[in-house]
Image (spheres, rainbow, N blue to C red):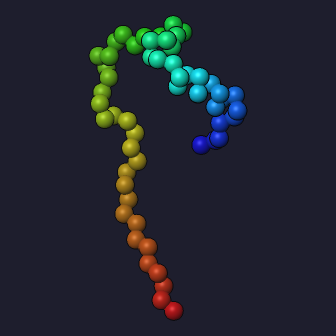
Amino acid sequence: MRKLTKEQRRDVRAIAGKRDGDIDFSDAPRALDWSKAELGELYRPEKKPVTIRKELQ
């Protein structure tokens, strides 16, 4: 993950200082139809066992 710039850190501090009711979400569309939503359907890579052996000299 990249580090934040000074401007981004300033913006994060400004937003963190606000209450939820004070943040303007008017430009974000509402998700009205949740009928096709599924829990636990996010991609999760398959776990594979790994063995590490130290070679003795």
Vertical comparison of 24 with 55: above or below: above
Vertical comparison of 17 with 45: above or below: above
Vertical comparison of 7 with 18: above or below: below
Q: Nearer the viewer, residue 43 or 32?
A: 32
Residue 2 at x, y = what percent? 64, 41
Q: Across the whole image, how many numbered discs are drawn on residues?
A: 0
Residue 28 at x, y = what percent? 50, 12
Q: Left or right of 44: which side holds 7? A: right
Q: Nearer the viewer, residue 35 or 10?
A: 10
The part of the image, by quadrant, that contains residue 4 is top right
Residue 38 at x, y = what percent? 30, 27
Q: Quadrant of the N terminus?
A: top right
* Residue extending farthest bottom: 57
Q: Nearer the viewer, residue 2 or 20?
A: 20
* Residue extending farthest right: 6
* Residue extending farthest front: 17
Q: Residue at x 69, y 28 (%)?
A: 7
The part of the image, by quadrant, that contains residue 41 is top left
- Residue 28 showing in the rendered view: no
Q: Residue at x 52, y 25 (%)?
A: 16
- Residue 23 showing in the rendered view: yes
Q: Residue at x 65, y 41 (%)?
A: 3
